[in-house]
């Protein structure tokens, strides 16, 4: 072997040994997900492995909706019967009302096995049904700490609880729930974008209306708000959050509490002269029609009824709050009360923008086509609408 060749070989060997030594000294990259602890929306500390979950189950009112906004629907291992429209035997109380998360994912949900019946009458998780679909995590909207801890122990997988709240789409619990889901499923960018969008929309409406003088504000009555089922013109709220965001004067005050509640017929009649604008939740129309047929004089006492200032907003409570519809409703009520400040806003375009942010699709026409949407946002012709 020549001296030159021996020198080349020696150099190669030194290089190889150097590389090996460097590799030995360099720590190996840990590509596995690490355990971490999150605090859910009822204060429970739950150990998770962010981004590792492949079989997800959502239970309780609105849990699947929140997950659909942030998570990957293809990872669902099962679905509650109420959200599977392909089943003949299931709770059907929301069938004629828009639930955009179901409409957007109807085909995917139809292929999944049952993880329980679900619906407003289901007040407990069905552990055996959940176990039968073999989840590796459960997102729940059941808010009892002891029951959630017991369910987690029985299932042997993390049970993470989310919440909504009285302020609907603008509630802090909603923002925190979206943030939590982003952490659990490694979708923080998506969750943050949606949270920021909601905040920006709220700020836009607030800023457009903040300089309206109190003397120029119309008195507005909101009614028919869903509360564990459809209601009628006597169901209202003195703290309707879209009114607060849009600086709208609420015709109702001095009620027993701050939640959605029914007022007496006598109070409704007494308020009549002070109601400049009346807004009806679309889900309540079917209940108002027979009452109107029975006693239309009660409605004729309302100034807004006499003046043709009665409007229809989209039903937003259906197995808890349709957040995208609640946001669109806020734009609509603001546009009704302050038309000059919102003349650039087309409700079909705005609704499509909102549903695209939440669910990735233009859904205005689908929402308006639902039987209890009656064609969408509109001024009601009180002479014919309730006939």
Image: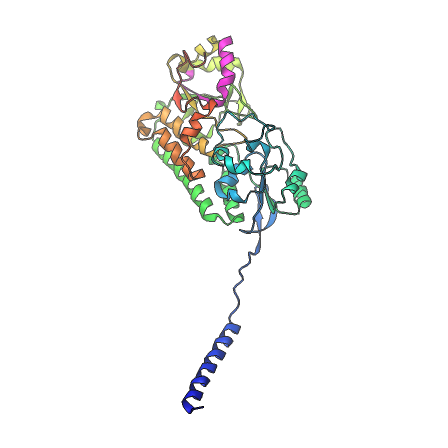
* Residue 196 drawn above or below residue 81: below
What residue is shown at x 54% (from left), y 48% (from top)? 184
Q: In the picture, residue 42 is in which quadrant? A: top right
Is 281 inside the magenta-drawn segment? yes
Is 38 inside the magenta-drawn segment? no
Q: Residue furthest front?
A: 1
Marker count (numbered)? 0
From the top left corner, tell me how far across and down residue 168 is, in percent: 49, 33
Question: Relative to the observer, which residue lies in front, 85 or 323?
Answer: 85
Question: Relative to the observer, which residue lies in front, 342 or 188?
Answer: 188
Magenta portion: prevailing SS class:
helix
**Residue 140 appears anywhere in the view:** no
Q: What kind of colouring is applied to the model shown?
A: rainbow
What residue is shown at x 42% (from left), y 16% (from top)? 274
From the top left corner, tell me how far across and down residue 101 is, in percent: 49, 35
Q: Quadrant of the C terminus?
A: top left
Q: Which residues are magenta?
A: 274-294
């Amino acid at each position: 072997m020549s001296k030159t060749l021996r020198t080349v070989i020696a150099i190669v060997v030194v290089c190889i040994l150097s590389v090996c030594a460097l590799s030995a000294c360099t720590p190996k990259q840990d590509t596995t997900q690490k355990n971490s602890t999150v605090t859910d929306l009822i204060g429970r500390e739950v150990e998770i492995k962010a981004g590792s979950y492949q079989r997800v189950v959502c239970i309780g009112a609105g849990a699947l909706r929140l997950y659909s906004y942030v998570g990957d629907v293809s990872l669902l291992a099962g679905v509650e019967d109420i959200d599977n429209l392909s089943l003949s035997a299931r709770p059907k109380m929301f069938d004629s009302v828009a639930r955009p998360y179901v409409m957007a994912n109807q085909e995917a949900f139809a292929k999944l096995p049952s993880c329980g019946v679900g619906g407003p009458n289901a007040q407990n998780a069905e552990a055996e049904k959940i176990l039968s679909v073999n989840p590796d995590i459960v997102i729940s909207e059941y808010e009892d700490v002891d029951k959630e801890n017991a369910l987690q122990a029985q299932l042997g997988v993390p049970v993470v609880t989310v919440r909504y709240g009285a302020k609907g789409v603008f509630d802090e619990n909603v923002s925190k729930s979206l943030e939590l889901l982003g952490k659990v499923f490694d979708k923080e960018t998506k969750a943050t974008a949606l949270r920021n969008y909601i905040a920006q929309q709220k700020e836009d409406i607030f800023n457009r209306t903040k300089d309206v003088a109190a003397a120029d504000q119309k008195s507005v009555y909101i009614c028919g708000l869903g509360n564990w089922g459809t209601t009628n013109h006597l169901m209202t709220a003195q703290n309707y959050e879209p009114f607060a965001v849009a600086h709208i004067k609420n015709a109702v005050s001095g009620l027993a509490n701050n939640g959605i509640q029914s007022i007496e017929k006598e109070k409704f009649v007494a308020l009549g002269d002070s109601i400049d604008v009346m807004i009806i939740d679309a889900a309540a129309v079917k209940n108002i029609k027979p009452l109107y047929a029975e006693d239309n004089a009660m409605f004729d006492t309302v100034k807004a009824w006499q003046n043709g200032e009665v409007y229809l907003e989209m039903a937003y409570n259906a197995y808890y709050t349709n957040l995208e519809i609640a946001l669109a409703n806020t734009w609509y009520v603001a546009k009704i009360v302050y038309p000059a400040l919102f003349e650039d806003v087309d409700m079909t375009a705005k609704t499509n923008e909102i549903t695209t942010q939440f669910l990735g699709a233009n859904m205005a026409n689908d929402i308006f086509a639902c039987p209890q949407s009656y064609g969408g946002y509109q001024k009601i012709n009180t002479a014919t609408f309730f006939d």
